[in-house]
Amino acid sequence: MKEILSLDHVSFSYEAEDGGTRRAVDDVSFTVNDGEWIAIVGHNGSGKSTLAKLMIGLLFPEEGKVKVFLEELNVDNLWEIRSDIGIVFQNPDNQFVGSTVQDDVAFALENNGIPFEEMVPRVHESLAQVNMEGFLDHEPHHLSGGQKQRVAIAGALAMRPKLLILDEATSMLDPQGRDEVIQVVDELKQTTGLTVISITHDLEEVLLADKVVVMNSGKMMLTGKPEEIFAHGDELESIGLDLPFAARLSRSLRQAGIAIQGEHMTEEELVNELWTSHFSK
Amino acid sequence: MLEKMIFGRYVPGDSFVHRLDPRSKLLFVFLFIVAVFLANNTATYALLLAFTLLVIFIARIRLYFLFNGLKPILFLIIFTLLMHFIFTKEGALLIDWKFIKIYEEGVRQGIYISIRFLVLVLMTTILTLTTSPISITDGMETLLNPLKRIKLPVHELALMMSISLRFIPTLMDETDKILKAQLARGSDLTSGTIKERIRAVVPLLVPLFVSAFKRAEDLAIAMEVRGYRGGEGRTRYRQLDWQWRDTLIIIIFIILVAALIWLRGGR
Ligand SMILES: Nc1ncnc2c1ncn2[C@@H]1O[C@H](COP(=O)(O)OP(=O)(O)OP(=O)(O)O)[C@@H](O)[C@H]1O
Ligand SMILES: [Mg+2]
């Protein structure tokens, strides 16, 4: 499998107000391979956004190495590497640069000097990928949060990125907007094999991931497949993360002395386990 | 109240005027503003007024909509007119009724100045009514492009303008939200002395500024990660297209100026 991004013992500190420094990321290492979906979870201030900024060269590590597409990020290759990474941030309003949907989607294309003739089909194509092709001339204040985030994703897709980073892209949305966005990204991943790093508070979103990185106070606390992570339910709850409903219920059932096997992350899995649990005996 | 004001507002449409290139429109309006000062007699002022009304007609703007939206400005124009009637004391006495004395020159000057003012306001309003803010910005950017040579940051100014326009509704919404939040906390903006009212505005402005700075920071980051490095090497998604109608209105302008020069002079 081809490596897309790797962090190798990366640390970073911000300057604190008192003149000292604050470790925001402390000795973090992991690798992201082509076509994977990685979820990074952690409580507020655990260093998730700092990680994202390190990945896209808004910050440079104090120690360790950040490699993107097998190249170490530096000032010279920064812009070239960025043109292959799409990133969507939390606040739908604050990342909408253009005056209309199509202007916003074209923004990165303009910046990268893509000729006009190529821009038009790319804008249409990427809006179609996020089901927003009917909104070309809409202005941002007439769109819902979920629609704005999908436009932001289209803006990233227009550059045909190899990697899409979502930094809590769904956390300011209502449940419907959140579902729209997650569904779009999931579809993209299925159809185009896009590599996705999604930073989130939401453990339901984690279920879609191939691999999960749990951050706690700047350190990588756990990493593994979602089911492996949810096996550490107590630890996750102790750092303030909410387990998905099915996982919580499954744990409570077990604590109540009901014999069920394995971990259950979706309601369907749990229901299946419950109604078949007495057959095997 | 702001809803009704049309000065500076854009109403989409597809008239001849709407379809003009923003460059030709901007150029035309700018030159027209200069040309208005050529008028100095009844014939020339009448020509300007007739021409402006013709443009309104071609742009398919309803007169009622236009004048209703410009009410405050019309009020100002009528006020100027009356001031001239009352205070200019030259020429033959036209009306002498009790203490009111209106002289010929006053009437003439008043009407001239009012027409000049009216025509300027109407033309600029037609421009903004028929051209989207983005097009105006684009047009300005290309028209001012030669000034880059003298180190005028044309691209940056245009970008600043389009981002400001883009964020006006966002910040309006936010102001509204903060206002409601402060009202819910019992702040009172509508009564009290002026000093008290000004003081009540402070808790409105502070959160607004804090959030505007936060937005600016987020926006700068979003622009940077999307590859924004200034105007150098950038291509444009919005293409401007100079067509026959654009050349036509420049020719019309030249004819208008010729007519003005020919008609001006004696009374
Ligand atoms: N620009 C900055 N200057 C100083 N300290 C900062 C700065 N940005 C973040 N920090 C601090 O670094 C730590 C990690 O912040 P970071 O934004 O990476 O957290 P996060 O996991 O993204 O949190 P959230 O879930 O709230 O987005 C926090 O303690 C934060 O206060
Ligand atoms: Mg964050």
Image: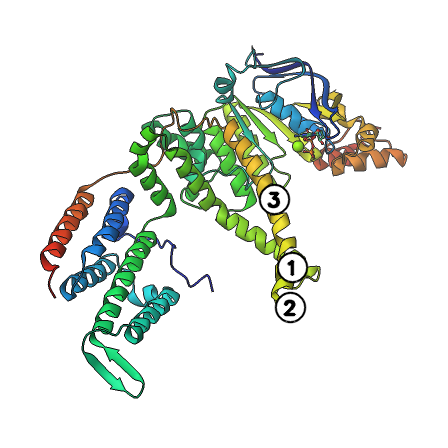
Work out how far the residue at label 3 is from the one at label 2, CA to CA, in angstroms.
Answer: 28 Å
In the picture, measured across the screen, residue B138 lies left or right of residue A168, that is: left
Instruction: Identify the chain of the residue marked 1, using the numbered disc in the image.
Output: B
User: Of marks 3 and 2, which one's residue comes earlier in the chain?
Assistant: 2
Q: Mark 3 lies on which chain?
A: B
Q: How crowded is mark 2: few (under 14 residues within 10 Å), some or many (20 or more)?
A: few
Q: How far apart are marks 2 and 1 (CA)?
A: 10 Å
Q: Position of residue A22 (x, y in %)?
A: 74, 25
Asked if marks 2 and 1 touch (Cβ < 8 Å), the reply is yes
Which residue, as the protein is rendered here, is positioned at the far left? B262
Residue drawn at x 81%, y 30% as measured from the top left: A233
Which label is found at residue B200?
A: 1
Choose the circle earlier in sequence order: 2 or 1. Answer: 2
Residue name at image x 60 percent, y 65 percent: B194
Mark nearer the viewer, 3 or 1: 1
| Quarter of image, res B231 | top left
* Kind of residue at badge 2: Gly
Q: For residue A180, what is the image quadrant? A: top right
Q: What element carries label 2?
A: loop
Q: Is residue A206 left or right of residue B227?
A: right
Q: Do labels 3 and 1 share a chain?
A: yes
- Residue identified by numbered label 2: B192
Q: Mark 3 points at which residue?
A: B211
Earlier sequence position, callout 3 versus callout 1: 1
| Badge 1 residue CB within 8 Å of ligand 1 | no
Q: Where is residue B43 in the image (x, y as percent from the top left)?
A: 13, 64
> Is the distance from the Cβ of mark 3 to the nearest ligand 1 atom less than 8 Å?
no
Horizontal and vertical percent position of residue B226: 49, 28
- Can you name the residue that lies furthest to the bottom here? B98
Looking at the rendered structure, the kind of residue marked 1 is: Ala
Residue A142, placed above or below residue B240: below
User: Judging from the image, what secondary structure is the residue with disc 1 in?
Assistant: helix
